Structures are given as structure tokens and as C-alpha cells.
Amino acid sequence: MPAAIVSIGKARLPLRGYAAPMFATLLGALPRPPLPIDAPPDALVEAALQAQEAAGLDPVTDGGPPGDRDLARTWTATQRLTERAVKQAVGGPYSATHGGAATPERARATLDRATALNAALRELAAAGCPLIEIHEPAAIAIGTDEAERALFREAHLRLLAGVEGSHLSLALTGGAADAAGIETLLAASYASLAVDLIAGPENWRLVVATPGDRGIVCGALSPAVDSDDGPELLLWAAAYAASTGGRGPERVGLAGASSFAHLPWEVAVRKLERLGDAARLADEPLDTRVQALDPRAVSSRAAALGHVDPRPSQRPDQGDAPT
């Protein structure tokens, strides 16, 4: 199948797995694959890549947690193992130094970290990495504190200064970061924003406030072991994000809400498959999408207009739940 050209924010990436404009990707890490304890690192990365590829994810990652060292070397080694676009997850400077009192020493450490990471990001972009994803879970603690807002803005302006040729994405997981304000979080030149919509449903405010020419990655699949991973919530999230700011589906992706590293391998793989299925389903004709959904997730008004046929397993006397 020829590669699809998908716009993620201002970038256009070749996603080779399928032709749908919607894409799915991993937001965080995967658990260790079930390989022998002495398996070489390349085998672990290859197993993580194969699981993502089989599920239809694109771009893919090495499956590890966000790093901050040897970024170009790590990305290059991973890209050699797959024909799909590989993104590199990077731990952000604000989260790396967060904790304790807001002291001048901590502020200096944050800015020094941003400056050091900037050199690594430039090297990573020069190596050809198409997408760099900066993870800042501590952003949920910024709130309305003006000093913390200013520190985050300055750190990220330093972090991204002169980084060219890569799509730059900011990932916020673990809770709600909306109180910090979009003018704080996107002060630097990020082309897309990835948000946890399970632990932080208030992050929808950030989605709405994000300019329409930026991409949105909806972290809408729960990382819980026993969650209901049907396509209904994922498709709703994707459609709503696409409707904000005239964004359109070509600037929207789907992801897990946060890391899957704590899950059993087989559960994590199943969640990857659900993400890939939902992304493919998002590009199907409306009738096909409706037939794939739980009828209770479709409005009773739509059913009354003949837009929903009951599934064979549904008894005729079971009405659709209103939305």
C-alpha cells in the first residue's frame, strides 16, 4: 500500500501502514516484551516496533520511556529497524527539575537543562528525526502560579530555539494542565499538542484553545487494565478535536492517555490494536462507522431517523440509550 501523506500540525509525514488520514501512535512506553532475560536491546526494540506495526500505528517509537541522552543515536538505531516513521520521545526540562520549593536554584537548573537539551534536539533533527515529542507530565502542577508559568515558557523557548526540520510536539499526561493556559504551554513553536483526556478531561479546554493549524493527539484510550476499549470514545474524541478551530481530521491523531509500561504485555498489545482499529475506522464511510459502534453510543434521535440498525445480538425491545 502506498504511503499516506498526513499533516500533523504544520508537518507532512509519510505514514506507510494505511491510507487513512487519521493516525494512531503510542503516547508513553510499552512493557518489556516477553523475550528471554538475556535478549539484546535491539530484540526488545524490534518486538515493540512489530507490535505497533501489526496494530497499524504510525509513527512508531522504540517503546521506551522518554529519554534525554544519546537521542540522535537512539533514534537512528530504531529507524534502521523499520520502514515506518519513528518519533523520538524526550523528557522535558520542566519535569526533570520539578519538585520542592520554587527557588532561584531550581529555576536555573530548569533553564540549564533546557539549554543542554536544545543541543541534543538540534542533533536529533539534523539526523533526520521526523517527529520529536517532548513529555512534560509536571505541567499539570503549574496552575495559575505566574512564576511557574514564566519558567515553563522560558524553558521551552530555550529548548526549541533553532531546532528545524522536525515536527515538534508537546505531550501532557497524568492529569489536567489547562489551568496553566494555552499561552503558557504553546509559547514555544510546537506544531502539535498531545493531551491525556482520561486522567485530565479538563484538557479538552486546551484542545479548544489550540489554534486550528496545530495538530492534536487525543490521548483517549485508558491505560487501565480493565478499561472498556471500544472505538466509541476514540472516534468521538477524534471527531470533536477535528471540529475545533477548523482543524480537520488530517491534523488529529489517537493515542493511549499515557504510558502502557505497567500493563501485562498482552494487554498493552490489545490496546495498541484498539488504537489502530479506531484510526482505520475513522476513515470509513459513515454507515460503516455507525455499524461498528455500540448502538447505545448513538443518539436515539439518529436511530429514529433510521441511521442505526440494531445489532443482531440486540433484542428488538431494547431501545438505544439517549446521548
Image (tube, rainbow, N blue to C red):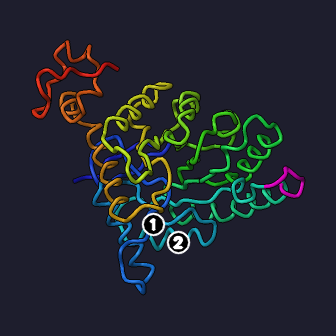
**Side (left or right) of 167 relative to 299:** right
**Closer mark to the observer between disc 2 and disc 1:** 1
In the image, which residues are magenta?
100-106
Position of 140 compared to 113: left or right? left
For label 2, the SS is: helix
Which amino acid type is shown beneath numbered disc 1? Asp
What residue is at 31 percent from the left and 56 percent from the top?
270
**Whether residue 192 can be seen here:** no
Q: Quadrant of the C terminus?
A: top left
Q: Where does the image place residue 138, in percent across and percent down from the top left? A: 67, 50
Rendering coords of residue 99 (x, y %): 76, 55
For this rendering, which residue is in front, 276 or 116?
276
Q: Is residue 261 above or below residue 228?
A: below
Direction from residue 73 to residue 309 in the image, left or right: left
Badge 1 is on which residue?
62
Q: Are marks 2 and 1 in contact (CB under 8 Å)?
A: yes
In the displayed image of the protein, which residue is found farthest to the bottom? 38
Q: Which residue position is annotated with label 2?
A: 74
* Name of the residue lying farthest toward the right: 104
Q: Identify the mark nearer the N-term, 2 or 1.
A: 1
| Front residue (pair 309, 71) | 309
Question: Who's the residue at 25% across and 52% down the image?
Answer: 2
Residue 303 seen: yes
